[in-house]
Each structure stands twice: as C-alpha cells, then as structure tokens.
Amino acid sequence: MAKFTVDLSPLKKYPDLRALFFSGLVTRFGSALTLVAMPFQIKELTHSYIDVGLMGAIEIIPLIIFALYGGVLADSVDRKKMIWICEAAALFISLALFGNSVMSHPSLLILYIAAAFFSAVDGLQSPSLGAVLPRIVSHDDLPAANSLMQLRWQVSAVIGPSLAGLIIATAGVKTAYIIDVVSYLASLIFILRIKAIPPSDKTNEANISSMIAGLKYAASRKDLMGTYLVDLSAMFFAMPNALFPFWADLVHSRWALGLFYSAGMLGSITVTATSGWVKTFTRHGWAITLAAVGWGISIALAGSTNSLSTILFFLAIAGASDQVSALCRATIWNQSIADEYRGRLAGLELLSYSVGPLGGQLRAGSMAAVTTLRTSVVSGVLLCVGFIGFFAAKLPEFRKYDSKTNYYAVLQREKKQNSTNN
C-alpha cells in the first residue's frame, strides 16, 4: 500500500515545503469561504443571475493580464517576497469586504472591485508559487511534493465551501470575510519562515522583452506545448459544469445538484490520496493523453444516462482522469523547465488551466441553448477526443515524453545534482 498512498515524506524532509504547505492550507480554506460569500452577497443585494455572473466576467481580464506579468516578475525578483506581498494585498482586500459587509447598505461596486483585485493578485502571485517548488525540493522528490500541493488545495476546496454555507447561514457573510482575514494573517506567518528565493538569472528584467523570451521558450518546447494544448482541448470542449443545474432537473434530482459538483472532486482526491506511484512513473506524455481522453469519454458516458448514480459515478471517474493529467503535467513542468524561465512558464500554465474551463462553460451553455443538453455534452466530447488525438499525433515530443530520457528533464536533473554536490 505504501507504493500507492500519498507520500508525506517531503513534508518531513523540507522545512520550506512544510511552511508553504500549511500556508496554502489555511489561506485556501479562508479564500474558499470568501469565494462562496461574494456571489451569495451579490445575489442577496440584486437578486439577479446576470449580476452574479458578471463577477466571473470581471475576473478573467485581470487574470490574463497579470498572470503574464506575474510570470515575468517571478523570474526577476525574490519569489518568497512576491508571494508574501501578494498575500498581504489579498488580506487587505478581504478586510475591505468585511468593512463593506458591516455597512448598513453594502456596496455592489466594492464587491466587483474586490473580485477584480483578487484576480489581479492571483495572477501576480500564482506564477511565483508555481515556480517555488523546484527551488526548495530535490528533483526526484518533485512529483511527491506536487501531489502534496494538490492534496492541500483539494482538502481546502472540499471543506471550505461546505463550511461556508453553514457559516453564512448562521453568522452571515461578515463572519466568512473575517475568517478569511485571519487565515491570511496565519499564512503570512508561515511564509516568513521560508528562506529567500532570489532569481537564478540576475540579468532577468521585468519587461516586455523578458515576457516575449518566455513565450519563445515555451513555443520551442513541443513537449510543453502538448501539455497546454491537450488540457485546453479537454477543458474547452468537455467541461460540463455550466450544465449541472439543468442536468439535475433533467434527471429529476434537483436535490442532488451539489453532488454533481462534488463528484469530480471526490475522484480527484482519490487519485491524489493514492498518488505514491507518481514518484517512479516516467511516461508522462502518454499518461496525459490517455487521461484527457478518459476525461472526455467519462463525461460522454455520464451524459448518456438518466440514472443519477451512474452519472455521479462517471463524473467521479472524469475527475480522477483529470487529476492524473494534472499530476503528470505538473511533473513535466517542475522537472524539465529551466529555473530562469520557471516563473514565466508558470504564468502560461495558469492561463492554460484557467481559460479552458471558463471558455468551456460558455461553449457548453451556448450549445445546449440552441440544441439540447445531451447534444452539447456528446458533441463536445467528440471534438475533445478529436483535438487531443490531433495534437498527440502532431507533437511526438510530447506524446513520447519520458522523464528518464527527455533532454530537458535530464539536463535539469543533472543541474540540480551538481548544485547539491557543490
């Protein structure tokens, strides 16, 4: 069983990883409360579906802009400082939300501005967070460390929203916001315990030329381009979340709407909890391709039945498939990207796994509106599998990626070993 259970040893081995783990655990729990409280408060203020949906539209533009710039900053400044400053900025945003919530007439504008600021801060911070791991963990321990980071996020994503409903119902949104503020304070203390992580290349500057150099590096790596394009294909064409409220009605199970959302996460957590295999697994290209196809087929099978239990089962399988892909993608990124480009590429990664689902929900909802729910699901899956097959065929460097033999992975492993020996 030890070969399959999640490997906790990196937490004991690396103090900086331990501090980063607990920092993220508490802050993501608090953020999960706020992510539920904000749309709830907008709904209470306006009773408008459009006004609630507008929050998502407001978030996407700052995310795109600041994710690219955040990647440039992650390669030109101390990553620990970048993470700490962004975390402190998010604390003040949550504090503003708390102040707004205790007013006699809370402002809708402040909620929208806070959503935009949160998105901008996330775009600035996430590339530095994504680029930290290879600097604080040995090359061989990166897969296990990444699994722990995934588990940290999943635990918070499940527990946070579940408790948010109870907290908001019994104590109001103001309590959710102040808990978020406290979680940021705790997170800042943990981050202070991490050692400084200055840029590997002191000549990197935070400018457009540096951003373009990062894009050129990504374009030159066909193995990396495969990870982005396959995931975009899977999420854009086969992301069904926007259909869940209608899907629950279609199978006469409105009461089970929450289960539609949680089934996929249950599958993801199961894979992460049994991810001991990632430490020795090396054929990541094939695994991502097959997992993405498995995601699509599982969504199609869920859409082909009216049985609630069968739908939830296949949604869980889809979530498990997606998590296999996520673990393998992260391993490729962490083990093969040169550290001097790591921040900029982390910005691209943030966009690749954020824009796909957002666009996918728009595609699914639009197609269902002009056809039917099942047509939207099945046609999307066909396009998903078709594009995955196309990219896998056209990018053999990605399809055949093996961390034992890949030129870039071997190069980074040797650099890490030489650095440790010296």
Image (cartoon, grey):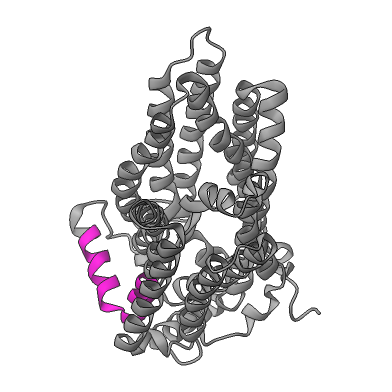
Q: Where is residue 30 in the image (x, y as percent from the top left)?
A: 62, 37
Q: Give the range drawn in magenta.
A: 211-229
Find residue 28 and report its horizontal and vertical position in percent. Answer: 60, 44
Q: In this view, does 144 lie above or below 389?
A: above
Res. 364 visible in picture: yes
Q: Is residue 417 left or right of residue 163?
A: left
Residue 220 drawn at (x, y percent): 26, 78
Residue 163, quarter of the rendered image: top right
Name above or below for residue 281 compared with residue 364: below
Name the residue at the top extreme: 104
Q: In this view, does 55 lie above or below 70?
A: above
Q: Is there any visible trace of residue 196 in the rendered image?
A: no
Overall secondary structure of the magenta stretch?
Answer: helix
Q: Where is residue 208 in the image (x, y as percent from the top left)?
A: 19, 54
Q: Residue at point 41% right, 77% down?
A: 385
Residue drawn at point x = 24 percent, y = 58 percent? 211
Which is more toward the observer, 296 or 28?
296
Q: Of all residues shown, which one is farthest toward the left?
A: 209
Tell whether 184 sits left or right of 366: right
Q: Does the magenta stretch include residue 179?
A: no
Quarter of the picture holding the N terminus: bottom right
Q: Residue at x 48, y 46 (%)?
A: 83
| Mark count | 0
Q: Position of 398 compared to 325: left or right? A: left
Residues 303 and 121: in front is 303
